[in-house]
Image (cartoon, coloured by chain):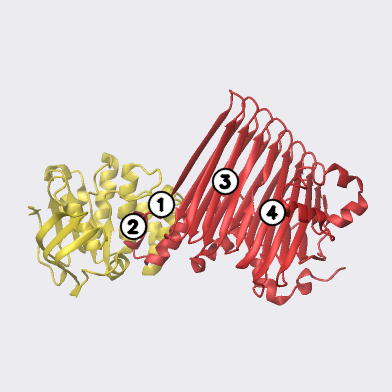
Chain colours: A red, B yellow
């Protein structure tokens, strides 16, 4: 039996890993994938109903997947980052296949960790949700406390076959000079549901991501939630594009962003192409001071007359009457502000199962120190 | 401005003293040379038409920055608090029930109850007072978000009771409250009135009659 995962990980990195929802004991997880720089740390637990191996091993084992799935949802020449990932010598990343009809109760966890200064981490992930399967995946991405600068490029392609369900939660906790460029493509077939939750409250030099989700089948659902706190000297340019192409498909893009002095660009683009689709976009932004800015860019694109699409966007400073209301209850000003900020980044909107919400809450608990 | 102090009896020690207070809101003088003295155990009820400055007085006592004290002093428990931050005044023992409280997304009534009662070290009171004010079903809701007028008022008095202040400032507690809940509210307010209380009411005194708590005090 392979040794404990915990024993193979540097003790110095424990705290950081736990902050991004990583369970070192693997107790409440169905399977684990850990990538330190480009080295995979073997996990102890073998999952049933779920195949979780490195992408390199998967290509060796199933040569056909390369042609069928890789670089199909994310184009190789999309930008400089996808090109450099396509040309990378070493192919790191995971391959996850949830078998037909398997409904995992415990979440699967994955972690991408940078633990060397100026390391350029390049990852290609592939997720296949077979018919009727269901799982929660929690992705923790972080860099070690002793790392200042680095780069993370993550290409992720996700296929949801009919009647499958995937809730994909990502918590980021990078260092101040790390550049983060995830590139994600998702394809959703009949009656399948994809939920993406993105959470970050720490500083990174720049995080720029815009997943592209193709709701291909009838009754397909795509939900994208992000909760972002941008401290000073950070730039978050995040958003999602959803193409509603399946009959009765439904999309929801919700972002709650706060600038504590950092820059935020909250994008969202919904493209309604088919009759009877329903889509809603919501961008709410809150500024805590006059050093940062928030730009909300909601785009609705209707290509069929019978679509139901709406958006609401609001950006403003933190409400003073709310601060003073709490202060009148004996709560000091800083605490009142952190409570309001925390309430604004309400994890309840993520619709997570209780044990995962607990993990996200842990991240949010650190907001008090971050503000 | 004119106030009619309907009822007062002189208790033991002085809780609040306001000396020739002038308050300005957005450049407009609302209160001028206002004086008030409140002792322990005393209940003061302020009547007056809308806009006369009843709420302004409360906001100034509580210390909201929008309400600028141009002249005079607010002395609470013998200490000049005219320039103290809001939360320090609350900590010293001033509590307020708002006429129009803001709703705050993501903060549960339960959460704020716990913060108030843990500061006071009496967690059991949440159960007791939420029952008293029939608020059990609202504890798990975002504070004031989608509350009816009456629910808001009950939640205000509930928080005030948890705070257990030395001086309660109760701003129009009965407005928007239905007849059935008036008695619930009245009984609860009676609890506050054991200590020093200033309460406003925009209506004629006779309209206070359905509030048993207040009625018995009047």
In the picture of the structure, the residue carrying the numbered disc 3 is A267
Q: CA distance from mark 2 to mark 4?
A: 40 Å
Q: CA distance from mark 3 to mark 1?
A: 25 Å
Please indicate whether residue B89 sits to the left or right of residue A209 in the image.
Answer: left
Please indicate whether residue A105 sits to the left or right of residue B16 in the image.
Answer: right
Q: Looking at the image, which residue is at 58% across and 23% down?
A: A305
Q: Looking at the image, which residue is at 16% across and 47% down?
A: B51
For label 4, the SS is strand
Q: Looking at the image, which residue is at 34% across and 65% down?
A: A330
What is the x, y in percent for residue A118?
Answer: 70, 70
What is the x, y in percent for residue A338?
Answer: 45, 62
Quarter of the image for residue A22 reads bottom right
Q: CA distance from mark 1 to mark 2?
A: 10 Å
Q: Earlier in the sequence, mark 3 or mark 2?
A: 3
Q: Nearer the viewer, mark 3 or mark 2?
A: 3
Q: Residues within 10 Å of mark 2 (few under 14, many from 20)?
A: many
In the picture of the structure, the residue carrying the numbered disc 1 is B104
CB contact under 8 Å: marks 4 and 1 = no
CB contact under 8 Å: marks 3 and 1 = no
In the picture of the structure, the residue carrying the numbered disc 2 is A325
């Amino acid at each position: 039996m392979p040794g404990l995962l915990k024993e193979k990980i540097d003790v110095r990195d424990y705290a950081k890993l736990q902050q991004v929802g990583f369970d070192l004991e693997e107790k409440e997880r169905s399977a684990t994938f850990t990538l330190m720089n480009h080295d995979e740390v073997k996990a102890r637990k073998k999952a049933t109903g779920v195949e979780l191996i490195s992408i390199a091993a998967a290509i060796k084992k199933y040569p056909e997947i390369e042609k069928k799935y890789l670089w199909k949802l994310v184009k190789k020449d999309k930008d400089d980052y996808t090109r450099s990932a396509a040309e990378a010598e070493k192919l790191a990343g995971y391959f996850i296949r949830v078998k037909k009809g398997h409904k995992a109760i415990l979440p699967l966890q994955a972690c991408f960790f940078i633990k060397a200064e100026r390391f350029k981490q390049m990852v290609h992930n592939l997720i296949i949700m077979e018919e009727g399967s269901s799982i929660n995946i929690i992705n923790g991405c972080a860099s070690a406390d002793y790392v200042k600068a680095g780069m993370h490029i993550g290409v992720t392609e996700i296929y949801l076959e009919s009647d499958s369900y995937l809730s994909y939660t990502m918590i980021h906790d990078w260092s101040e000079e790390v550049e983060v460029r995830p590139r994600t493509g998702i394809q959703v077939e009949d009656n399948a549901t994809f939920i993406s939750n993105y959470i970050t409250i720490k500083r990174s030099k720049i995080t720029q991501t815009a997943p592209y989700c193709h709701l291909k089948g009838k009754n397909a659902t795509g939900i994208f939630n992000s909760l972002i706190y941008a401290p000073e000297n950070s730039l978050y340019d995040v958003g999602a594009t959803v193409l509603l192409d399946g009959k009765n498909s439904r999309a929801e893009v919700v972002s709650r962003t706060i600038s504590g002095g950092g820059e935020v660009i909250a994008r969202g683009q919904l493209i309604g192409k088919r009759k009877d689709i329903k889509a809603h976009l919501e961008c709410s932004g809150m500024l805590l001071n006059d050093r940062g800015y928030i730009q909300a860019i909601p785009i609705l694109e209707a290509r069929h007359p019978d679509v139901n699409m709406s958006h609401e966007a609001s950006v403003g400073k933190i409400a003073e009457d709310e601060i003073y209301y709490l202060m009148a209850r004996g709560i000091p000003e800083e605490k009142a502000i952190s409570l309001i900020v925390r309430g604004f980044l309400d994890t309840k909107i993520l619709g997570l199962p209780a044990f995962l919400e607990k993990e996200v809450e842990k991240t949010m608990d650190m907001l008090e120190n971050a503000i | 401005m004119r106030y009619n102090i309907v009822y007062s009896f002189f208790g033991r020690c002085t809780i609040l003293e306001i000396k020739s207070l002038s308050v300005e809101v957005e450049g407009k003088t609302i209160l001028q040379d206002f004086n008030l003295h409140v002792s322990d155990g005393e209940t003061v009820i302020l009547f007056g038409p809308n806009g006369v400055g009843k709420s302004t007085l409360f906001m100034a006592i509580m210390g909201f920055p929008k309400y600028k004290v141009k002249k005079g002093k607010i002395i609470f428990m013998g200490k000049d608090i005219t320039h103290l931050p809001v939360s320090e005044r609350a900590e010293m023992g001033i509590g307020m029930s708002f006429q129009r409280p803001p709703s705050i997304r993501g903060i549960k009534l339960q959460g704020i109850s716990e913060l108030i009662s843990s500061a006071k070290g009496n967690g059991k009171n949440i159960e007791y007072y939420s029952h008293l004010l029939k608020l059990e079903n609202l504890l798990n809701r975002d504070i004031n978000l989608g509350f009816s007028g009456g629910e808001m008022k009950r939640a205000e008095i509930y928080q005030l009771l948890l705070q257990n202040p030395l001086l309660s400032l109760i701003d129009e507690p009965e407005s928007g409250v239905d007849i059935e809940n008036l008695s619930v509210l009245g009984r609860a307010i009676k609890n506050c009135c054991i200590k020093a209380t200033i309460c406003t009411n925009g209506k004629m005194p006779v309209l206070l009659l359905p509030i048993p708590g207040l009625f018995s005090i009047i």
